[in-house]
Amino acid sequence: MRSKKTWLAAASLLLVGLGLAAPAQASSCPAGTVFNPITKVRWNCIFPITIGGVRIGSFDKLSKELDAQSSSKPLCACRKGATFWFGVKVSFWSPNRMVDVVTEPGCMMALGADLLPTHGKLQGSQSSIADGTNTRKMFAQMHYYVSPVWKMLDMFTDLPCLEDDGFDVAMITEVLPTWQSGTLGAIIQPEGILFGNPAAGLACMADSAAAAAGKVIDPLFWCMGSWGATYPVAGDIHFDDSVEAWAGLAARGTFMMGRLGALTISSADGCSFKPQPIWTKSRYKLQIMEPVKGGKCVNIGRPGALWSSGKHAPGKDNAQFMLFEKVICCAGIPVP
């Protein structure tokens, strides 16, 4: 507890030190947004579930290829230290992380509180771009939470591949100068310069078309379908649809966690989790929880015209997402 207080105090000092000029205004962090996994999570997003090659529930195009990994080799064997176990391969979509995208700095929507008042600094914004395209630019902060819902609800605890971490705040971008400026971000992530060219942009058109069809192209890691590009890894994003822009910043924040070494996915054999410095987009999908609860989950980059209608309540410019990860697990019996 003492270390967390020390960290928050240091974060507050950094916020003041950044001193990015903005008109002071009172925070309008919404009340009543405390995370409730029972009411906020869209539980049909955990489907399809595949057990030993047998599918339960309908699947979309995103799930089809991933479920094939479980069906092709339904039996599995794992080793962890001196422990061996044999079993059947199980796969499902697990709600493991949450992401806030907020225009009010310090507004921790999952906690329902404004923990880091910045006195008008680091404020989110929206502006028009005078280039004749009628596009706009949004700037917002991102908060990334470790929130293993199965662990929080004490469910499926016998599955060996479920995360055993508790709820935690893993990242708040208010303390990252690189999130406030794409130029600063390029200093620590210079590879982003390689993808800021017309050829890389044209490649993203293919990813956008795939996202509209319910798929993603994993090798195009610098693309987020119709949501824009992962680079620069900063809080600015061009948009036509506010909800789509929120989702784009949530996805970019997830990509950033991988670049920081804080992203893992379950291995194809179902025996362990492995680091993901470059994300595998097909392993993730998002469900909007605030300001309006979404009726379904969407793959990374899915065009807003297909899912964002009615999700932006008037006067509500802070959003909260649940991030579902495709988990592949070897569920079995330990062998002495």
Image (cartoon, rainbow, N blue to C red):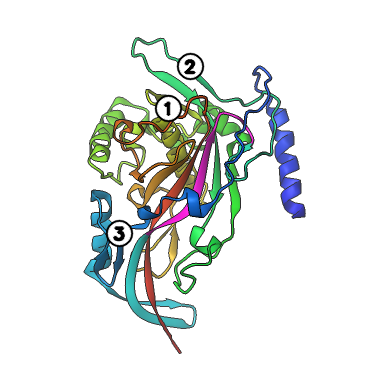
- The residue singled out by tag 1 in the image is 242
Image vertical order of residue 324 relative to residue 295, above or below = below
- Kindly identify which numbered label has been placed on residue 48: 3
Instruction: Classify residue 209 as left or right of residue 266.
Output: left
Instruction: Name the one closer to the observer, 18 or 61.
Output: 61
Label 2 residue SS: strand
Residue pictured at 66% horizontal, 17% vertical = 23
- Magenta residues span 93-106
Which of disc 2 and disc 3 is earlier in sequence? 3
Where is residue 91? Give x, y as percent: 34, 64
Q: Is residue 263 visible?
A: no
Mark 1 belongs to which amino acid?
Answer: Ser
Q: Is residue 231 magenta?
A: no
Q: Disc 3 to disc 1, how far (Cα)?
A: 30 Å
Which of disc 1 and disc 2 is earlier in sequence? 2
Which of disc 1 and disc 3 is earlier in sequence? 3
Where, quadrant-wise, is the N terminus in this rendering? bottom right
Q: Residues within 10 Å of mark 2 (few under 14, many from 20)?
A: few
Residue pictured at 66% horizontal, 24% vertical = 121
Q: Are marks 2 and 1 in contact (CB under 8 Å)?
A: no
Q: Disc 2 to disc 1, how far (Cα)?
A: 12 Å
Where is residue 108? Give x, y as percent: 61, 40
Instruction: Classify residue 131 as left or right of residue 162.
Output: left
Mark 2 belongs to which amino acid?
Answer: Ser
Q: Within the image, what quadrant is residue 44 found in? A: bottom left
Q: Residues within 10 Å of mark 3 (few under 14, many from 20)?
A: some
